[in-house]
Every structure is written in structure tokens, then in C-alpha cells.
Image: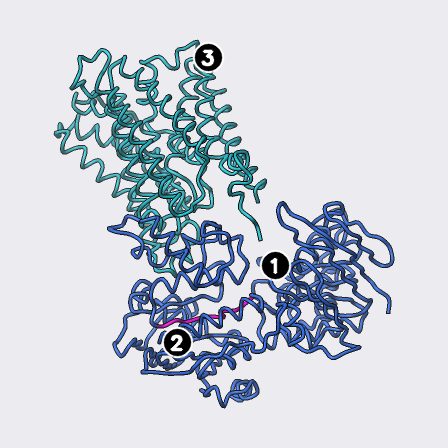
Chain colours: A cyan, B blue
Amino acid sequence: MNQPNATGGGIAAYLLKHMREYGLLFALIAIMVFFQIVTEGVLLRPVNITNLFLQNSYIIIMALGMLLVIVAGHIDLSVGSVMGFVGALAAVMLVEWSLPVAVAIPLCLLAGAAIGAAQGYFVAFWRIPSFIVTLAGMLVFRGLSLWLLEGQSVGPFPKSFQALSNGFIPDLIGSGKPNILALAAGVIAVGVLVWMGLKTRARNAQYGIEDEPAAFFWARNAIIAAALMFVIWKLAGFRGLPNVLISMVVLTVIYAFLTERTTLGRRIYALGGNEKASKLSGIKTERLAFLTFVNMGLLAALGGLVFAARLNTATPKAGFGVELDVIAAVFIGGASMSGGSGKIVGAVVGAFIMGVMNNGMSILGIGIDYQQVIKGLVLLAAVFFDVYNKRKQG
Amino acid sequence: MTALLEMRSITKTFPGVKALDQVNLVVRKGEIHALVGENGAGKSTLMKVLSGVYPAGSYDGEIWYDNAPAAFRDIRDSEEKGIIIIHQELALVPLLSIAENLFLGNERAKAGVINWPETFRQTEALLRKVGLKEPPGARVDSLGVGKQQLVEIAKALSKDVRLLILDEPTAALSESDSQALLDLLLELKTQGVTSIIISHKLNEVRRVADSVTVLRDGTTVSTMDARAEAITEDRIVRDMVGRDMAHRYPDRTRRAGEVLFEVKDWNVWHPEQAERQVIRNISLQARAGEVVGIAGLMGAGRTELAMSVFGHSYGRRISGEVTVGGKRADTSTVPRAIAAGLAYVTEDRKTLGLILEEDICRNTSLANLPGVSQRGVINHAREAEVAEKYRGAMRIRTPGVFQKVMNLSGGNQQKVVLSKWLFTGPEVLILDEPTRGIDVGAKYEIYGIINELSAQGKAVVMISSEMPELLGMCDRIYVMNEGAFVGELPAAEATQERIMSLIVTE
């Protein structure tokens, strides 16, 4: 019988086993350091860090939903189109019909959920492959955005709607230079992270669950804390915490909790891992697959609103090809194509890797042609790394 | 008789594990040699060494084949020498025809253009040899498993096989298909084909084998020659498990209580073929503390009956009544069936029972997540505790509950499936082939668990293709044929012959 490398194998064995999780984080840090050097410090300027969050927020928001869809064993190719369509819908409601923002936003989110439900209906209850249903959706909603906007760009949006993306949390406890609220939030976030980590460790120790060596735990937390505080420090020196960063963090925490701690999340993993076995274990697999699509639609709608708010205009080309960035982020983050595995944090880090590369390469003035090639190769390398690791362990 | 194959002092180590330790195996020309041992004893590893899956150099020891040392680099290499292995999981392409499958990778072709008339002619000849009457153009997925197995053998014959290795060839076959397969092996023997058969079914071993080698924990325990001495099943079992097994079935105090589970007038139609009735007017009863068996050939509709009762997981136009504990139970969906106190342990644990990529812990809680959570939030500590409890109670042999079930042996996997269902707190357990593909020692433990459950007053319905198992375990046996019950026998009156005659005379 195989003996586990509990303590004997030591740090090297542990690192090898968890290569993927650490690898992803270090890849992100390495990429950031690389671009920081080659852009001669532009990447991590306060204004650019702020931009990084604003530019990638909608990708990250949609990656959360996409992770669930992919874990459930499906795919959603329509998110780019749906995002564009909802942006267009918001423009029509706010600019042409002059609806109040507080009415338009819920309506748009509802529209997104309904679109997700329509696609999920065919996937879950009629068992049409999600690739086909959402490919159809991709075409349909691309067309509908064009029709809604009549081929024109529509804008600008009311100020309160723009704040969704471009607003900042005012410094409530300081003068704003530097932003004390941001710094406080950063310190609290680091504290909470470490506290939760310690709590998990204590519990694992109690139940004899294998855990990372203490040195690793502290080193990892120190690096994360340093990186986090560094970013916060930079943000605090500019305009403070962007609204959209807060929504992103809150959503990430909610979805991480959902996937790792709730029965709902567990059932989605089970569904993707073995649908038939899950069904025979009393899990309502159809309903669950349906819900992941409803959720995806909702988040695609939110992504669309955030995107439109940032550009301050809805264009017929909005969301073009975005589905590929979102899907790539999830796979870079370690999700498996066949379903059943993948993590929220992985997807978010994957999205940041893509985002930093986009941003860094744009600063360097690298053409869109090379950018595509490089991003493609990074995606392939990440998945290859996964497969290679698995084979080595298996 | 001279030896065709001699494996000497084969030692194969994996990181941290010695899978084979100085194993010797001698197979004589023209004999059928049975290789037996518990799961994990090293049979498959030994065959992988032989066929070149583990290339020469990755193991210690010598292989002599045809009086010459052999060092196979890969499967192709060993196949060229006429060593062909047929794995438990068949390697046929279901959507291609028999002829296409037979010559896959070995096409009768000139410059890449297939000569179809020649292919079909040769296919027909090969099919005749293995006793199949199907046309060469028939698609493989239109054949039953038994016939597919024969196609695999025909494929081996097309490659001029000298040493045929069959890894548990009858594990998925019905009684009659198994007989046909074994007859074919005997027939091939007269034509000079030597074979090695890996099997858990000792009656089959006894029937066809000329000699038997027993492996245990990666070493050769004994080699017996049926031509020189009589080989008894008890002797083989003793060598396999390393101890005397006085009883193959643990004792149980039989004490049946009130009727706990009842199915009345159950009718089910085929999910796709609207005209075909799969289950006809079946009525079944099981008392608290009773183990009830359902005997029948493969295809009799036993699994269909069980799955249609359990949450209408099979079939259409289902009618009939289920009662649990005297009350009418709604079993129209799986969650409702579970709530009514039913549990169904599938015959196909890998595709229907487990999430192979996940660990024991997550598989154990799967059917009763609310049992380890509060308001939808899972308490991981409680979950681990539950899994640990069942690991201990079931004696699942792993270092911990965070092992992926993929890496467990068949017996341990089955115990995980049982744990999952016991954690739902069922009153009625329907066990579909609960010991299929697991070794003798683990079987005995599963029987112990079943007895334990009946002692707790649960009703157990046990479906099995192994009649001795039903006779050894059950209080009462229903005999099923073509979707209907054709008889019911108390255990005391049941024999294999009576059951078979009920099936045949109907």
C-alpha cells in the first residue's frame, strides 16, 4: 500500500505535490516583477494599478461564474455577447428611456439571469451540449446588441451609473492623502487572511489532516501580505479604493465560500466529477446545471454594466471575444476541462495573470498581434504544466 | 511438456512499494494456467511486466520465452512474439464494425487502401473459430459484453497468438456466456494455444486450469498442477488469503421481523423502445432483518427493477406501489427514495457509485450532505469525523480519508460506496452485485457488513449473479427471468440446480 509523504518527504515533496497552487501565485508575482522592470516602473504606478483593477474587473466577475459552469462540466461561449447585450440594454434604458439608475440596474441583472436561464434550460433539461447552446446564444445576442443600438454607440451615462466602475470610496476617516481608509482596509484584510489561515491550520491539526509545513504557511502569508499592502499603499496614494475593487473582492469572497463551504458548491463539484453517480446519490443534477447558467447570466450582466459604465458608452462591439479571455482565465487558474475541479481563487489569479500581461504589453507598445500570440502560448503553457504535473505524480 | 514461458525472480518496485518480490511463474506449452490472488497481490503488475508495459530494465529478474531470454521494450514487441493480453476493460471501438475492430492497426491493406473483401473473408473465418455467428459488418456496440469478449479473442487470433492472457474475462459475463468462453479456451488449447487466465471465480479456475499459481502480497505462494493432484477451492482460498477460511460466508443468527419493504405490481417499460415492457407485475417483500436474494441471468431485468424502484432511475411508464414500514412510500425521485429510507448500491461502482477524482471523505458524505452541514454550510471537521468513523467500521484500508477513491482497490471502493449509503440511515438496502470484481478477503468482509445490517433490523435485497453467494447469504431467494419473477425459494430449499431449472423451464 502506498505510504503518504506525511513528514518524511519533507518540504520538497510537499512543494511538488502542491506545485500548481504555489506555481500560479508565483507566476503572477514573477510576471508582475518582470513587467515592472521592463516598463521601468510604469506597471506599479498608483494610477496604473488602479487602471489594472478597472480594466479587468468585468473579466474577473465573469470568471467567477465561468468557474462554476466549467466545474459543472459545461462551458459558456455566450458571455461576451451577453455582456455586450446587457450593456446595450442599459444604454437604451438609461439614455433613451431615461429610466432611473436604481430601476435600470436591477432590470439589466434580471435580463442577464433570464438569458442564463434560457440557455441553461436547453443545456440542463434537454441535454443539448452547452457548447452548441451557448454558441447559438453568442450569435443571437451579438445580433440583438447590434439591433438594440442600431449599430451606433450610445452614451454618455448618468454620473451615478458611471460610479459603478469609475467611482472611489471616499476617505471617511482621513484626509485622503494618503487614503487612510484604504490602508485600514488593507491591514484588516491581511489580518483576516492570516486569522482564517491559522484557524484552518488549527482545525486540520486537530483532525490530523495533512497541512503545509509551518515555514511555508508563514512564508506564503508574508508574501501575500506584503503584496497586498504594497498594492493598497499605491492605491492609497492615488484616489483610494475603487468601487469596483470592493465589488470584486466581495464577490470573490462570496463565491469562494460558496464553492468551498456550502452543500450547493459541493454538489456542483460532484455533478462535474460524475454526473450519474451524483444523480443516484440524490443530487438534483439538472436543476444544479440550470442554476450555474442562471448565475453565469447574472454575472455576465453585471460584467456588462461595469464595462459600459467604465467606457461611459455602449458600443456594438463591446464584449467581442471576451468569452475567450474569461475561459482562458479559468483554465489558467487550474480548472479541468472535464469538470469537477478548479478553484475560485485560481480563476481570479488566472484573470489577473491575463490582465497584467495585457496591461504590461500595452505599456510596452507591443502590437495586438504579438499580444494574442503570447497570451495563447501562456494559456497552453499553464495547461501543459498541469498535465505534466499530473502525469509525474500519477 | 516443455515450458513456453518462464519468469524468474521478477522484482518490480514502485516508489515506496515493492509490487513484486522474487516472483516465479512457469507456463508450459499448450496448457491453461490460472493466476489467482487477491486484488493488489500483483497479478496485473506481473502481466504488465510480461507484456512489456513495464519495459525490460524497469524490473529485476529474467523472462525466458520459447527457451530464449526475452526483453520486451513495449506491447508491440511482445505482440510480435505472439503474447497477447486481453484486459478486463475491453479495447474495442464501439461504433466500428467487428471486421474493422479485428484488424484495427493491422489492416488488410495495400499502400493504405483497405482490401474489404479480404478483410471480411478473414473476419468470417475468425468469427467461426470463436463460435460467433454475427455478420462481420455488425457494429460492436450492437453486441452484448459476452460476444464482445469473443471478438477480442478473435482479434488475438488474428495476430497469430501463442500465449493468450485474459484478465478476469468472465467478470462481466453471464453464466452461459462464461461457459461459452471457457469452452472456447479449452477448444483453443486443443489447437495449441497456451493461455494464462486471471480470475476470481474459483469454480471456473478448477474447471479449465491445468495448473494454478497463487500470488499473495507480490510473492508466489504456491503452484499447483491439476494433472498431478486434485486442486480444491479451499486449498486455493487458503493460499490466497494466507489463512484457513472455514466458512466462506460468516454465520448469522436469522431473525426476520415484520414486513419492512414491499413492492407491489411493479411494471416498467423500456426508456427508448416504447413497446418493450422490461419489468412485468413484480411483487416483492422483505422483512426487517431479512436478506432477500434476486437470482437470474444477466439481462433478466434485476438491475432495471432495482433502479426503477429507486427514484425511477430507469425506465418509463412505471406503475406499482412501494411501501416501507407499512406506509406507502413515494420513490419517484432519488431524493424522495432516500427520504423514504431506501438505499441502492449500484453494480457499477466506478461509473454510477463514486466520484473517482474525489477523496473518501467527500464520497462518504455525498448522499447526505445535510448530515454534515448547518443551513447549507458544510462543517468540514464533522465531515472528516464521519468519514473516519466509517473508515474504521468498514475497515477501509487506506492511510486516511483524504485519499482519492480512484487509487483504492475494488474492495475498498465498494466499502466507500456502502459507507455513503449507510450514512443516509436507510431502512432498506438494495445491493446490486455487491461483491463483483473484489477479492475473496474483501468479499468476506462485505458479507460480514451485510449480516451486521440485517442484525440491526434492516431489510436487505441482494442481487447477484453468483449463485453460491446468494445461497450462502440469503434467507429467501426470488428467481427472475425476462422481467418477471418465476419462483421464490426459502434458502433451505434452494440449490443452484433448482434455481437454474426455474429459469430454464419458464
Share a chain, discs 2 and 1? yes
State the SS at label 3: helix
Q: Give the alpha-carbon distance from disc 2 to disc 1, as whole Å.
A: 31 Å
x, y (%) of residue A224?
38, 26
* Residue under label 3: A37
Chain to which the residue tagged by mark 3 belongs: A
Q: Which residue is drawn at 58% across and 78% down?
A: B246
Q: Which residue is drawn at 72% across and 65% down?
A: B196
Write down the region rendered in magenta: B428-437
Q: In this view, does A110 lie to the left or right of B81?
A: left
Does residue B90 sit above or below A136 in this rendering?
A: below
* Residue under label 1: B40
* Residue under label 2: B455
Badge 2: few (under 14), some or many (20 or more) residues near its Cα, within 10 Å? some
Q: Nearer the viewer, residue B211 or B503?
A: B211
Quadrant into which the N terminus of chain B falls: bottom right
Q: Nearer the viewer, residue B75 or B267?
A: B75
